[in-house]
Image (tube, helix red, strand yellow):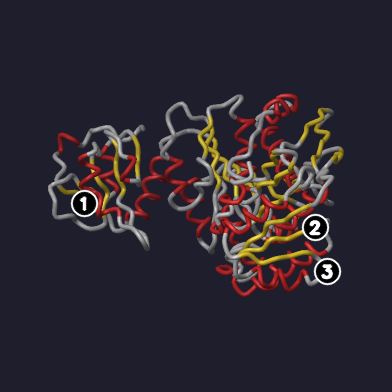
Amino acid sequence: MDLILKEVIDLASGYKNIPEKLFNKNINAIETDSRKIQKGNLFFALKGDTFDGHDFADKTVESGAVAVVVQKILPMPIPQIIVKDTTGFLGKLAEYYKSKFDLITIAVTGSCGKTTTKDMIHSVLKTRFNVVTNSGNLNNHIGVPLTVFKLTNDTEILLSETGMNHAGELKYLAKILKPDMAIITNVEPTHLEGLGSIENIAKAKFELIAGVSKGGTAFLNWDNEYIRKQAAGLKCEIVKYGFSKGANFTFKGYSNKNSVYTVDYNGVKIISPLAGFHNVHNLLITCAVAEKFMIPPKDIKKALDSFEPSGRRMKIVKNKGITIIDDCYNASPTAVLNAIKIFDDTDIKGKRYFVFGDMFELGKFSEQYHKLVGKGIQTSKIYFTLLMGSAVKWTLKAIGKDKNVELFAEHEDIINFLKKNLKKGDGVLIKASHSMKFEKISSSLY
């Protein structure tokens, strides 16, 4: 890292047990996990609801940490940098650290698809540039600063996914990142528990756009009605990608086979690396950003031909003649209905089984949207639905008696059912919010 101990001390409230001769000590990395400390790291003692990093501060020094950042003075002779709030100071230090670099910053947000979009953009940009990006979906008030701390003097582009579940969070992350380009993939009914309405979700997403630097660019999904409404009055350059009236970046055409889309981008045929029309939008924004960096269509195609999605996102696996669509990383109403559409469009000769679990953070809208999924199942090609959770009782009610459906109590019960009933030629789709831990089910199938 391009960071010495004195720079951190100068931003803090005070320090203890650090002699001045160590002020010019280089910091190798910022670490918040006491178990991962290496020599030369600076340890942040973060405090959460169920953990307190201060309890492990002395152990990190024993492991080689140059100092610990704390929000309370510890009664032990270890080098301490004292701040009011360690989590807040993590962001403050990240904002300072980023200011030391001359690079282009791209920030991605959206209700669905932001990790896939970020990963697709990264797969293309890294063919030409030195790009730093989030590991997985480390996209919150801790993950974004830790991404910033990966910057080096060789970095040309910072590409950061940014997540939120309440108003003000993206404003905070935009202050750290100061993006030159900001992307909103969509605005859908997610995090309703904290935000109350889809209109409020749109307002919260546009906090990122408000943080775009002077002369910067906003990339907006023009097919999303909430984005179009919220975009009125923006003063930065807007790339309106999509297929609706008013869009200024689109594909000339596209075709679909088994829910896998091939698009025509300036005369080059590019196959979307992930199934579903919603992933055509992710491909659109990838091409729009790549065009800003003057990467030709043939090079975009080459980069995406070897693209692999991170995590369990629309991963299609064939095992023993059975088609498994492992999409259990997370779930929102829109994403679930998209997954069902893909499942319907997939070439499956036998029976279709759908494993569905609770969608979280919907608040008072939970019943409405779990019933909506039930109605989607009702009109689909799904042969048997396997439910698990508490909110899926509304899905069960909406499906009714015309479809095969059963409520299960444990992961093992679902696994045993599938292993007993799945036959060659059948297909299974697995979808739920991340906390449902449905990866236990999908991992048992391949």
Residue ID at (44%, 34%): 151
x and y, in percent, of residue 72 in the image? 23, 58
Residue ID at (57%, 61%): 410
Residue ID at (26%, 54%): 54
Residue under pointer 2: 383
Decide if residue 103 is in sight here: yes
* CA–CA distance in space, label 1 to label 2: 64 Å
SS class, disc 2: loop
Q: Amino acid at mark 2?
A: Tyr
Relative to the observer, which residue lies in front, 110 or 349? 349
x and y, in percent, of residue 24 in the image? 23, 33
SS class, disc 1: strand
Decide if residue 182 is in sight here: no
Q: Amino acid at mark 1?
A: Gly
* CA–CA distance in space, label 3 to label 2: 10 Å
Residue under pointer 3: 402
What label sits on residue 250 in the rendered view? none
Q: Amino acid at mark 3?
A: Asp
Image quarter hosting the C terminus: top right
Q: Quadrant of residue 9?
A: top left
